[in-house]
Image (tube, rainbow, N blue to C red):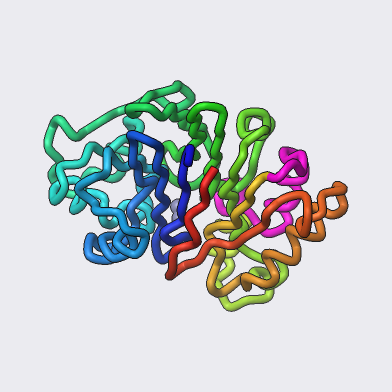
Amino acid sequence: MEIKFCSLSSGSSGNCQYIETKNTRILIDGGFSGKRMEALLSSIGVCPSTLDGILVTHEHIDHVKGVGVFSRRYDLPIYANGNTWLGMERMIGKIQEKNIKVFISEEYLDIKDITVYPINIFHDALEPVGYIFFYNKIKISIITDTGWVNDNMKTKIKDSNLYLMESNHDITMLKEGSYPWPLKQRILSTKGHLSNDDAGRVLGEVISGKGEIVLLGHLSQDNNTPDLAHKTVKSLLLNQGIDTNKDITLDLTYRDKVTKVYNL
Ligand SMILES: [Zn+2]
Ligand SMILES: [Zn+2]
C-alpha cells in the first residue's frame, strides 16, 4: 500500500474526504456533525484521534460543519488560507491557537510525509481552493465546488492517478427544474458548480486513459442522477478516445455513504 483514498461523502448535504499514507491521515473538509463524521470514519476503521489534521476547501457549511467540533474533540490542526479562516471563524467556534494553520493558496505545504498544493478555484466563497496531493510518485486531485476549470487548473491537475471531479448537475434538469431563477443562475455561473458536461470535457482534456481512477463528486440531489452523471461523462470521454470500460476506472461518490477505499 502506498496511499489510500476514500470519499466519506460528497454533495451539498456534506463533504468529507479521507487520505492516508504510511505516516499521515488527513480529512479534506468536514461538512457533517461530529457524530456523523465519527460514524463515517469508523465505517472504514479509522479512529478520529489518529488523524493529523483537516484541510478546508472553503467556508460553506456543507464543508465546515463539523470541523471545529473535531478539532476540539481530537486536538486536530485545521489548515485553510487566511480568507477561508475569516469566513469560517464564526461557524466553527473557538479553535486552539496551535491548531490554527494558515497556508497561502498556490504554495506547496507539507503535512508530515504528504505534500499538498492548494489550488485556486472559482466559487462564490471568499478564497476557495481545490487540493492536489503528492506522495512518492502518486498524485491525487480534488476539484469540487467550482464554476469552471481554467488552464492553470488543467495544467496543474494533469497526470493525476486519482481525480475527484465535481459533476454537480445536468444542465437541462437544472434549467427545467424547480429551483428559483437566481439560484439556477448562481449554479450555472462561473462561480457556481460544474455540470456533468463540464466534468466530462475537463476530464477528456487532462486524463490520458492509462488506468486513472476518476470519481464524480458533489452530485446534486435535485438536478442530477448518478446514472446520468456517469453516462454523460462516459460518453464525453469516449469522444476523446477513452473507454471507461477498460482504460480508466469511472466511479461515483455518494451523498450519504462512503465509497470503497482506493489503494494507489
Ligand atoms: Zn459544497
Ligand atoms: Zn460551496
Q: Would residue 150 be found to the left or right of residue 104 on screen?
A: right
Q: Quadrant of residue 172?
A: bottom right
Q: Would residue 78 be found to the left or right of residue 149 on screen?
A: left
Establish if 82 lies above or below 189: above
- Name which residue lies at 43% across and 45% down: 125
Instruction: Report the magenta residues as a range.
Output: 189-211
- Name which residue lies at 13% across and 44% down: 94
**Looking at this view, is 63 or 54 the one in front?**
54
Picture quarter with ligand 1: bottom left
Residue 197 in picture, x, y percent from top left: 73, 56
Establish if 13 lies above or below 76: below
Q: Is residue 186 magenta?
A: no
Residue extending farthest bottom: 178
Q: Quadrant of residue 95?
A: top left
**Looking at this view, is 33 or 44 the one in front?**
44
Residue 104 in picture, x, y percent from top left: 39, 24
- Name which residue lies at 55% across and 40% down: 141
Residue 221 in picture, x, y percent from top left: 53, 72
Residue 163 in picture, x, y percent from top left: 59, 45
Q: Would residue 242 be found to the left or right of residue 221 on screen?
A: right
Q: How many marks?
A: 0
Q: Would residue 63 be found to the left or right of residue 135 on screen?
A: left
Can see residue 185?
no
From the image, which quarter does the C terminus lie in? top right
- Name which residue lies at 64% across and 40% down: 149
Q: Is residue 209 magenta?
A: yes
Can see residue 143?
yes
Residue extending farthest front: 1
